Image: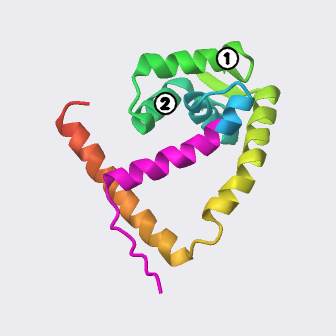
């Protein structure tokens, strides 16, 4: 009888899981000429019931991705240029083309997400959620001490 033990979670394991899941997403995004950062910026715009404040969207994305503001502004400008997002003064909103693309991406990634997450017991997901929230809080606190 073979027994396998599950190693405790650590930064490497978290990173490997992140990159594996991100590769699944990026395989879909590539087919639609979109990159990861573009999708991260597009998502809240597509999900919003109304226009979003451009500065708030950029700030939230910078904080989430730990990216520089110029890079995120450039990504948003690119989405506007390609017609996926429209800008009105200081606000942005999804266009019909942007919504259609976002919905296609969600549809294509849903099946893979179901295969990846679907049979994990709820109590494991809750525990993992608690641990990941704590890790993110601590990492963000650590970054704050370094001035980033």
Q: Secondary structure at mark 2?
A: helix
Q: Residue furthest top?
A: 81
Q: Is residue 18 above or below residue 38?
A: below
- Residue 144: say if magenta: no
Where, by quadrant of the figure, is residue 117 drawn? bottom right
Q: Residue furthest left?
A: 145
Residue 64 horizontal/vertical position (percent): 44, 38
What separation in Å lies between label 1 and label 2 (alpha carbons)?
16 Å
Residue depicted at x 35% and y 63%: 9
Q: Residues within 10 Å of mark 2 (few under 14, many from 20)?
A: few
Q: Secondary structure at mark 1?
A: helix
Q: Is residue 6 above or below residue 111?
A: below
Q: Is residue 125 above or below residue 146?
A: below
Q: Residue furthest bottom?
A: 1
- Residue wearing tag 1: 80
Q: In the image, 60: left or right of 131?
A: right
Q: Nearer the viewer, residue 107 or 137?
A: 107
Q: Nearer the viewer, residue 56 or 44?
A: 44
Boundaries of the magenta span:
1-26
Q: Residues within 10 Å of mark 1 (few under 14, many from 20)?
A: some
Q: How is the image coloured?
A: rainbow
Where, by quadrant of the figure, is residue 8 drawn? bottom left
Residue 127 horizontal/vertical position (percent): 43, 71
Q: Main secondary structure of the magenta part?
A: helix
Residue depicted at x 66% and y 37%: 27
- Residue wearing tag 2: 56
Where, by quadrant of the figure, is residue 28 drawn? top right
Q: Nearer the viewer, residue 106 or 61?
A: 106
Residue 59 horizontal/vertical position (percent): 44, 30
Residue 30 horizontal/vertical position (percent): 68, 30
- Residue 13: say if magenta: yes
């Amino acid at each position: 009888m073979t027994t396998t033990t599950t190693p405790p979670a650590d930064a490497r394991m978290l990173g490997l899981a992140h990159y594996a899941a991100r590769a699944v997403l990026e395989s879909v995004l590539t087919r639609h000429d979109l990159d990861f950062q573009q999708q991260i910026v597009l998502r809240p715009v597509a999900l919003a019931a109304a226009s979003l404040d451009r500065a708030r969207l950029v700030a939230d994305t910078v904080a989430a991705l730990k990216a520089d503001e110029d890079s995120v502004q450039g990504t948003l400008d690119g989405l506007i240029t390609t017609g996926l997002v429209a800008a009105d003064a200081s606000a942005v909103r999804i266009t019909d083309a942007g919504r259609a693309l976002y919905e296609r991406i969600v549809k294509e990634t849903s099946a893979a997400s179901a295969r990846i997450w679907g049979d994990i017991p709820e109590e494991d997901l809750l525990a993992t959620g608690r641990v990941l929230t704590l890790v993110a809080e601590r990492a963000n606190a650590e970054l704050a001490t370094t001035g980033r």
